[in-house]
Amino acid sequence: MKSKKGILFDSVLCVGCGACYEACKTENDLGEIPEDYFKQRLSDKNFSVIEDYDGIYARKLCMHCAEPTCVSVCPVYAIEKKENGAVVYDADKCMGCRYCMQACPHNIPRYEWASNNPRIRKCTMCYENRTSKGLPTACAEACPAEATLYGDLDELKVIARKRIEENPDSYYPEIYGLDEAGGTNVLILASVPFEQLGYAPNLPKEGLPKLTKEALDKIPGVVTFGGLFLGGMYWLTKRKNEIAKEKLVKELDNNDK
Amino acid sequence: MVALFVVLTFVLFIVVDLFVVKSQKKHHPAFSVSHSFQESHAMFNKKSFLLPQGVMLTKLHVWLNRINDEKVRIGIDDFVMKALGGVKVVPAVEMGSFVERGQVVFNAAVNNKKIQFKAPIEGTVVGVNNTNNEITDPYNNDWVLEIIPKNGDAKQTNVIKYEEAFDWIKSEFKRLKDFIIEQSTQPTLAGVTMYDGGNLVEGVVSYLGDEAITKFEKEFLS
Amino acid sequence: MINKILPKITFWRVVGVSIAIFGIYSIIERFVYGLGAVTNLSDEFPWGLWIGFDVVCGVGLAAGGFTISAVAHIFHIKKYEPLTRPAILTAFLGYAFVALGLIVDLGRWYNIWHPLIMWNPSSVMFEVAWCVMLYLTVLFLEFASYALEKFNFNKILKLIRKALIPIYILGIILSTLHQSSLGSLFLILPTKMYPLWYSQYLPYYFFFSAIAVGFSMIVFESYMSSRAFGHGLKFSLLSEISKITMVFLSIILAAKVIELIATDKIQYLFIPVTETYMFYLELIVGYIIPIFLLSNKELRTSRKWLYISSVFVISGFMLNRINVSITSIQRSAGVDYFPSAQEIGISIFIVTVGVWVFKLISNYFPVFEHEIEEGENDHAENVSVEGILANK
């Protein structure tokens, strides 16, 4: 079995140079690279951005959840969790219902609103050209400060814990992504609580797909029970009417005698 | 806000439609008013029906009454008389002819529309009431035919037991009300309190137009 | 002369034609320039009026078809039979126009058939898509059995009638599934929805309120067609089915109150924000007022108040559905979504076309005549039942 890959973003080490942003734009062929990259937000042209929270830089990108909500909600399986952990979208299958955008707890998927043939756009963990071939992601390769690392998810967790232990004063003592909505393949370290940097707060520890699975699991029961109940009621009420009719006929006969 | 907007749009369409209906001088099924109608007319309700001892009602609303060992009289009942209003009945069979059960034996004219009554028994016609009056005394003077039943008895008919006759009349009255309400585009025609007891205008069916009279014939007289 | 060629100009015809012109213009604009050009949807707010109103409300408002079919065909309460045809026609048109609304809303609408071959059974949307597809087929068959009467295609008619009872049962099960699934769609948004609306019982609320509003829609639609066609109103029947509406509304209201008390959500009732007011409005308009009106026998048996109560139930239902799908998400999305003129125009246009088609079909097919031909249809019913028995 191939090991799960992941990305570690360490906002403490991030210097906000914008190399990851540029690398991402170039790698995914997302058009011209603007000067004011701090002002950019996730969009169909930005799979990954750096946001500036008063000198603390926070990267936003697809979290590549362990149990991706988008994969579970897509009616046509247009989004898939690959063997290395990347969550990848296939435009040929997509019908454009945008349930993935609505359902994503991290608000990641973006849409080509201006297009008449719109696709969902988001970070693919450079699956097609890089990570499926064993290469690191473009952003990790470009980062000069070791703020974005690509590697085995388990190893990244060890690195993250070590960084917190070695510099407890610089780090908020938690890793974002260990169990947010069932855990993610992207881990984040920061000096302040994560919601201050715009990461989705209060996510349940379990994956969200469980919530709808419970409802969907009831379907076979509803069909079986419903079929039996309605069939039974049909027969029962019909019989009741027949008996009532027979009784009426009998009574009328008696009247006549 | 979107929710509010959608609901207000819905309500706006309904309200505008009310004004449109009003400007076209039509009746909206929910808001039409004409209370004066029933006041000038005689009324009846489920308690106001007559049934002399010995008269047997049938589902066809044609009554039977054995007047001696041989002969049975038939005529239209109080219920039909009140529902249709002033009815003239014309026999459709001649003296001495043999009538089958279910055969049309007399006609009544309502609004120049003919409606038919069917025989509840079979037998030979031995008497015809030729007074040709508007029916006012249905069970006595205004009988229609005298028949000697086949085999000498009135067996095997849909006769309603005397004890049950009033309940049956009540249920027929309720059925008539539902019928009126369904047929009527003017709700107040049926009376003020349409449901619990309540009154109906005499001849109410004849006010509903020819189509309703045909339906009445189908639903109540066959 | 001109008067004879042109249809008479009435207020609603003028309004209808204006709606159609703007609607068609907006639809063309949407298919030429894409969703971004005509809607106020955004990455932050991907589902707007078309999903909230056309789909989530639309499917619910077409629920009269399956509820009346259950009462009349499965529970054999014969007297409700006259209500079934218009209700099933309404449902069929309702779903057809939900599908139309979806085509407008789907970004890659030409792939709408993909759920047929690309299966993801863990997706609620997949279930909804399948149920709606199957139910549309079922409704089509039910309606075809009426339409074929008109053309005397007796062989096909016999065939369909033989299968009619299983078709009715299938239709009811499918409706149960997708009415509740529309609620399940939102189960996966626990962190995005406002707590007053998010509930693990959403599927149940959706299902029961669909039943309640289904009967109210039959009442409302009966008044509308009585107004349009000038025929009579099955008033006593409408008054009776409204009792069912009242029972289901009471059940939902009680469940909601119990849930609020049992969970810590009750605190949200006292926070003075828009969501709280909208929640109160929904409860008052959709539950408290209609329960009061319908539980009073005098009001329930008054033409005026029965009509008004149905308007309340329907309004409350729409408030609820749009609150769930739009209001509850606005706070977490951080944007103020309000539909664009084209979104509104297309939604109203779809409803208008629905009304027109209903009128057209009612004029040419035996939708309402059924009540005159009662005797005849009883016979037809017998044929179908005997047919099933003979098959075994």
Image (cartoon, rainbow, N blue to C red):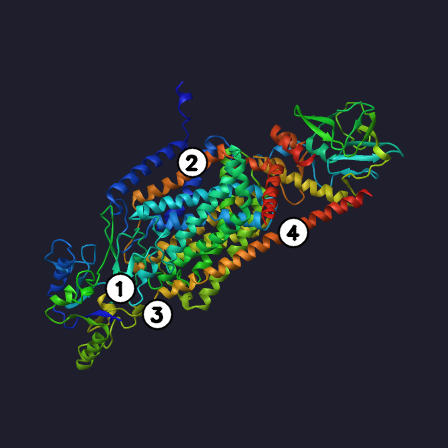
Q: In the visual, does A164 lie left or right of C281?
A: left
Mark 4 closeness class: few <14, some 14–19, many ≥20 residues within 10 Å: few
Asked if A223 appears above or below C240 in the picture, the reply is below
- Left or right of B175? Residue C354 is left
What residue sits right under mark 3 in the picture?
A206
Q: CB of mark 3 within 8 Å of CB of mark 2?
A: no
* Residue C374 higher or lower than A88, as above or below: above
Q: Nearer the viewer, residue A81 or B206?
A: A81
Amino acid type at circle 4 is Arg
Query: Which badge, 4 or 1, comes first in the chain's sequence?
Result: 1
Q: Where's residue C116, x and y in %?
A: 37, 51
Residue pictured at 77% horizontal, 23% vertical = B132
Disc 1/disc 2 C-alpha distance (Å): 49 Å
SS for dot 1: loop
Q: Select label 4 or label 2 by which is in front.
A: 4
For disc 4, the marked residue is: A239
Q: CA distance from mark 4 to mark 1?
A: 57 Å
C217 lies left or right of A126: right
Report the residue marked by disc 2: C356
